Image (spheres, rainbow, N blue to C red):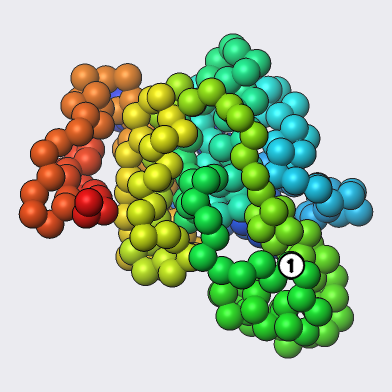
């Protein structure tokens, strides 16, 4: 990794986990928007992309077990953090659990995007068992997949097994008993994300370290359009970790009537009302 310019972020790898149906390729275009010092390293789950043909995972835990070896190798290069969107957030969380159990160098932070905490009941009915046509229509309605995919039956037949396997992982996920994580968490959500519970701050119960929230304009797939802003915020947070300024920014502040507090750099951070 090249050193950060201008005394900013010290070099750090951000290990990225994709959302349902996607491969590591989903993060390739993000690289050009990453701030200096931040190297994006997408992890490739089995059954897609460069690992096409490998058996699909039977659980989120199995996915984390499989990707742990690569994460352990990558952390030999020094500072790192984890990022996951939707399904990827669950895998990133389980990966952090395994890294903590292993000991050694821990992630600087865990970035959890567009996903409720493990104990929060899902708002939607499971769809992974629906017939192909009905399943495809539900996936299309959720967004996040190119319209061209649904206009080409042959292409859709290739991708449906990946999508169905990933939805099964998310819809059947049950968290095993685990010690609260000592890694700081940053939960990232779109303000219009209809898949989230009324109280998205319930992630806090899974962490002994600080758990802060960042909100963005947009819905469940806010990151597809706002990844430059997302990466700027991630870089700013990582740049301050371990400094007095970051400790102050992450400390709980008195909330006003609007239920908001200020995060690092004076950015507004919304909190749910009691």
Q: Is residue 54 above or below residue 241?
A: below
Residue lying at 34% horizontally and 64% vertically, measured from the top left: 191
> What number of labels is visible?
1
Residue lying at 75% horizontally and 46% vertically, measured from the top left: 59
Q: Which residue is mark 1?
A: 128
Q: Position of residue 64 (x, y in %)?
A: 70, 36
The part of the image, by quadrant, that contains residue 234 is top left
Residue lying at 43% horizontally and 42% vertically, measured from the top left: 203
Tag 1, which secondary structure? loop
Residue most toward the bottom? 151
Q: Position of residue 248 (x, y in %)?
A: 19, 26
Residue most toward the top? 104
Q: Is residue 187 visible?
A: yes
Horizontal side of residue 246 vs 16, given as left or right: left
Q: Quadrant of the N terminus?
A: top right
Horizontal side of residue 134 vs 54, given as left or right: left
The part of the image, by quadrant, that contains residue 211 is top left
Q: Is residue 177 above or below residue 233?
A: above
Horizontal side of residue 214 vs 70, given as left or right: left
Q: Is residue 144 visible?
A: no
Q: How packed is label 1: few (under 14 Cα within 10 Å), some, or many (20 or more)?
A: many
Q: Position of residue 214 (x, y in %)?
A: 32, 49
Residue lying at 71% horizontally and 29% vertically, measured from the top left: 68
Q: Position of residue 8 (x, y in %)?
A: 32, 30
Horizontal side of residue 245 vs 154, given as left or right: left
Q: Is residue 254 above or below residue 188?
A: above
């Amino acid at each position: 990794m090249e050193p950060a310019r201008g005394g900013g972020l010290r070099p750090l790898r951000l290990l990225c986990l994709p959302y349902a149906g996607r491969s590591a390729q989903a993060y390739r275009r993000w690289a050009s928007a990453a701030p200096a010092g931040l190297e994006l390293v997408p992890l490739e789950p089995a059954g897609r992309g460069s690992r096409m043909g490998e058996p699909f995972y039977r659980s989120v835990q199995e996915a984390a077990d499989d990707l742990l070896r690569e994460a352990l190798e990558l952390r030999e290069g020094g500072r790192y953090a984890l990022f996951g969107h939707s399904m990827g957030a669950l895998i990133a969380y389980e990966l952090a659990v395994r890294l903590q159990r292993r000991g050694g160098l821990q992630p600087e932070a865990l970035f959890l995007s567009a996903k409720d905490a493990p104990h929060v009941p899902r708002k939607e009915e499971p769809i992974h068992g629906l017939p192909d046509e009905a399943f495809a229509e539900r996936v299309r309605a959720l967004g996040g997949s190119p319209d061209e995919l649904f206009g080409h039956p042959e292409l859709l037949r290739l991708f449906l097994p990946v999508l169905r396997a990933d939805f099964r992982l998310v819809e059947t996920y049950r968290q095993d008993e685990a010690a609260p994580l000592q890694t700081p968490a940053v939960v990232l959500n779109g303000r219009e994300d209809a898949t989230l519970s009324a109280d998205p701050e319930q992630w806090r119960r899974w962490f002994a370290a600080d758990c802060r929230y960042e909100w963005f304009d947009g819905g469940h797939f806010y990151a597809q359009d706002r990844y430059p802003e997302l990466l700027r915020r991630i870089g700013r947070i990582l740049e301050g970790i371990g400094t007095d300024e970051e400790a102050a920014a992450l400390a709980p502040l008195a909330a006003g009537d609007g239920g908001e507090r200020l995060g690092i750099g004076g950015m507004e951070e919304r909190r749910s009302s009691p």
